[in-house]
Amino acid sequence: MNVLLCPFSDPGYLYPALAVGIELRRRGHRVLVLARPRAAVVIGEAGLPMLDAREYHGGRAFSVGCWGETGAAQYRAVAAAAREIGADVLVTSALCHGALLAAEALDLPAVVLGFAAHLWPYRHGGEGEPEHVVLREWRLRELLRHYHATRERVGLRARRDRRPDLPLIGAGLLLRGDPALEYPGAVLPEGIHHVGPCAWEPGADPAELRRLTERLARIGKPVVYVHLGRTFGGESLWPRLNATFTGGPFQAVVERARSGEPRAAAGADLIVVERPWMGPLIALAEVVLTNGTSSPVLAALGQGRPLAVAPAGSEQPLLAEACVRSGVAVRFPGPGGEGGMGGVAGGGAGDGAGLLKAVCDDEPLKQRARRLGERLNRSGGAGAAADFVTSVVSRNPVGAREG
């Protein structure tokens, strides 16, 4: 079987796809990765051959920051690469509309790796969920608007589907979380499945990790791992981080990720990093503080660490709400004194350091995080996703479509 991995080249999207690709290769399948050049080192470490997206005129099409603008280029790049290697199946990311359209045009199944929780309306159930926080209906409408605009640009005729979300799930949408992160009593739509984290990341440099560990030991305070995401035009969390980690009982390692330039204050016990790995840093931490993106949430729970969440936008408010509801996280006060942004209500001005200490002292919360982490670690992950990929190759990927 020839497998083309064509996710976004950003770590939160690329790494889960690489985990699935590594497992498929272990089973004897041929796996290639279509990606931006900057991902070459990481893909090489995963041991998979790479196709340079620039050679298919899709250099920008695999950056999630451009997902709404480059769908047509992504369509052409994926279609050309899939033809060249004789692909039997595509594995791509949520939001990769060009890849989904290429799969349809080539009559190939496309398996979509999603987030930690379902982001669109449930099949049924979910009554009582705060829609102003999770924005399921709005999110689906916006994604379909982008999808249909891309479809028109590439010249494919309109679809008639029995369910609005069908064009976005391909042969199946695989969620990397656990049913505990869904609203109680809600039922997922047909074709959407939980498989677990699909965890993989590049190895940490031992010398670099040793230097960082020694620096933390010199400061001597308990460690909080902070993983920042995009702010989506909202206020930065840096003022609250500076207040929390200046003269307080904790120190922090802050992964800046896609959050922009760091704003650490002089005298704050903050070490700012930009690394392609987070597992060893989470292992050093008592608590993980995050905006609520899927990768740090799953990585924290995978090591049994409790969470503090301060969401900004995209899937962050929905996943943050799910973590708080399932009892593995607390809301961290945002820059304006609220418990995060994006509609997740907070507890007033609050004291960041006091909140983190309360998390460290809350044994039931930590036990819930460990239990959920153990369940995630047993869920199958990349193996379950590889099983699904293998199972769909013999099916007609457009068989679920009407008209």
Image (cartoon, helix red, strand yellow):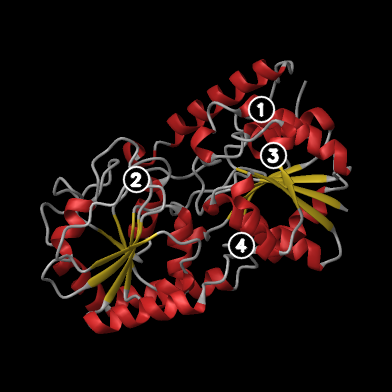
Give the label on residue 73, or none.
1
Q: CA distance from mark 2 to mark 1?
A: 26 Å
- Gap in Å between the C-alphas at discs 4 and 1? 27 Å
Residue 322 % position (x, y): 39, 54
Identity, as a three-letter code, of the amino acid under mark 4: Cys
Report which residue position mark 4 lands on.
Answer: 198
Who's the residue at 60% across and 33% down the image? 165
Mark 4 vs mark 1, foreground winner is 1
- Measuring from the top left, give residue 310's x and y in whole percent: 28, 52
Amino acid found under the numbered disc labelled 3: Ala
Task: Specify the quadrant that holds the C terminus.
Answer: top right
Percent x, y for residue 352? 17, 62
Task: Identify the element where label 1 is drawn.
Answer: helix
Foreground mark, 4 or 3, reads 3
**Residue 395 place in picture, x, y as percent:** 85, 43
State the SS at label 4: loop
- Residue at image position (15%, 61%) is 266
Task: Kindly indicate the quadrant of the structure image that contains residue 189.
Answer: top right
Q: Is there a contact, CB below 8 Å, between mark 4 and mark 1?
A: no
- Which residue is disc 2 drawn over? 260
Mark closer to the observer (3, 1): 3
For residue 53, the mark is: 3
Q: CA distance from mark 4 to mark 2?
A: 27 Å
The kind of residue on which mark 2 rests is: Gly
Label 4 vs 3, first from the N-terminus: 3
Is 270 on the left-hand or right-hand side of 82? left
Sort mark 2 into few (<14), some (14-19) or many (20+) by Cα contacts within 10 Å.
few
Verify CB contact (< 8 Å) between mark 4 and mark 3: no
Q: How many marks?
A: 4
Alpha-carbon span between mark 4 and mark 3: 24 Å
Q: Identify the residue at horizontal 81%, vertical 39% (top origin).
A: 82
